[in-house]
Image: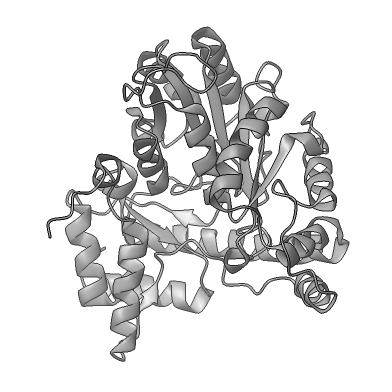
Amino acid sequence: MTTEFAGRVERVEPSATLAISNKASALEADGVDVVDLSVGEPDFPTPEPVVEAGHEALAAGHTGYTSSNGIPALREAIAERHRTMGVDCGPENVLVTPGGKQALYEAFQTLVDGGDGRGPSASGTSSRAGDEVVLLDPAWVSYEAQAKLAGADIRRVDLAPHEFQLEPALDDLADAMSDDTALVVVNSPSNPTGAVYTRAAFEGVRDLAVEHDASVVSDEIYGEITYGVDQPAAAAIDGLDDRTITIDGFSKAFSMTGWRLGYMIAPADVVDQAGKVHSHSVSCATNFVQRAGVRALTDPAVDDAVGEMVAAFRERRDLVADRLAEHGVELSVGDGAFYAMPRVADDDTAWCERAIEDAHVAAVPGAAFGAPGHARFSYAASTERLEEAVERLADADLI
């Protein structure tokens, strides 16, 4: 039998991040000591109060379905957290999902129409043709994949000539946008660069979004992890509140990657429409995990643990920057997240292959993010392992 696959799936490449991580795991299974800097996962345990809340919820029997959009206590806690950031929102603006990636998927599916000629929608309106999604390169690998799955035409803006900052590239963004632009995706702090965009950058995005009547997806999953700078909440910018879909979650700041808990905050009509995708796909986020999420947002001891983790990440960022500088490696140091994206070689894919094979250091090729010539290092690893990674790369004449 010859299986024909859907075109939308064949347009998508596997995750380069997971491909490198899988290769590292295979080497480790063969007894090779690999310094794995490929995966964006905090190396800190989930804060103990959150774990306790999960145990308590299980013991209390919270193992069934919840309301599709999330339990009321969590939706209110999320709304309250974002109100402190200046976002005008309530529980009706919150959709809780199993991981931030699911929230992002639902946003793309809700707001992007691939114009595939299906004719009128259920509401009787005609399909839009060829919606565009604008990505800011370097961009997290799943943005492109999810845009393609939604059938979008993709436009890209290269931030590399501007030290990965958005504000000096606003003219380039203006050139990339048109009246066919459905979404602009903004990620600050950035994966993979750690760059934090300025308020002026968000105001520039706002002006262009208003001009072209586009929506803005603001991925703020690393928003709690910044170093001495303010991270604007996009939905708190005047004029962006009614056209922003904020994507956030618990994986990074609360070291809860395996718990799979995320959410979107959006205008109520967007939440209502995204809720259709949600209810027909994942139904709801896990019951007891949602209750642990409430504790993560409301227990002061958790805030203390997050603060300690962020302080450690800042020290590691500075260590990596200093060690790479000693070897003459070009690096724009970011003010958030836990990634460094140095310039490595014109053929960054070959460089990363050599790094894992010759130095047993795993990093992700920059080309996967739209930044050829670079590699992404995650410094969510101990200082000892980070020091060893740089030494191994130097010994292998890779830096």
Residue 386 is at least partly visible in this image: yes
Identify the colour scheme used.
one colour
Q: Where the N terminus falls, by quadrant? A: bottom left
Spot occupied by residue 149 in the image (x, y as percentages of width and height): 36, 40
Q: Is residue 292 above or below residue 369?
A: below
Name the image quarter holding residue 123.
top right
Residue 280 relative to residue 308: left or right: left
Q: Nearer the viewer, residue 311 or 348?
A: 348
Residue 259 relative to residue 172: left or right: right
Q: Is residue 229 above or below residue 317?
A: above
Counting labels gives 0
Name the image quarter holding residue 131.
top left
The residue at the far left in this view is 2
Spot occupied by residue 258 in the image (x, y as percentages of width and height): 58, 68
Name the image quarter holding residue 138.
top left
Spot occupied by residue 158 in the image (x, y as percentages of width and height): 34, 31
Q: Nearer the viewer, residue 32 or 310?
A: 32
The residue at the far top in this view is 211
Residue 225 relative to residue 70: left or right: left
Spot occupied by residue 295 in the image (x, y as percentages of width and height): 82, 62
Residue 156 is at least partly visible in this image: no
| Residue plotted at (34% across, 20% down) | 130
| Residue plotted at (65% across, 54% down) | 284
| Residue plotted at (40% across, 27% down) | 134
The residue at the far bottom in this view is 31
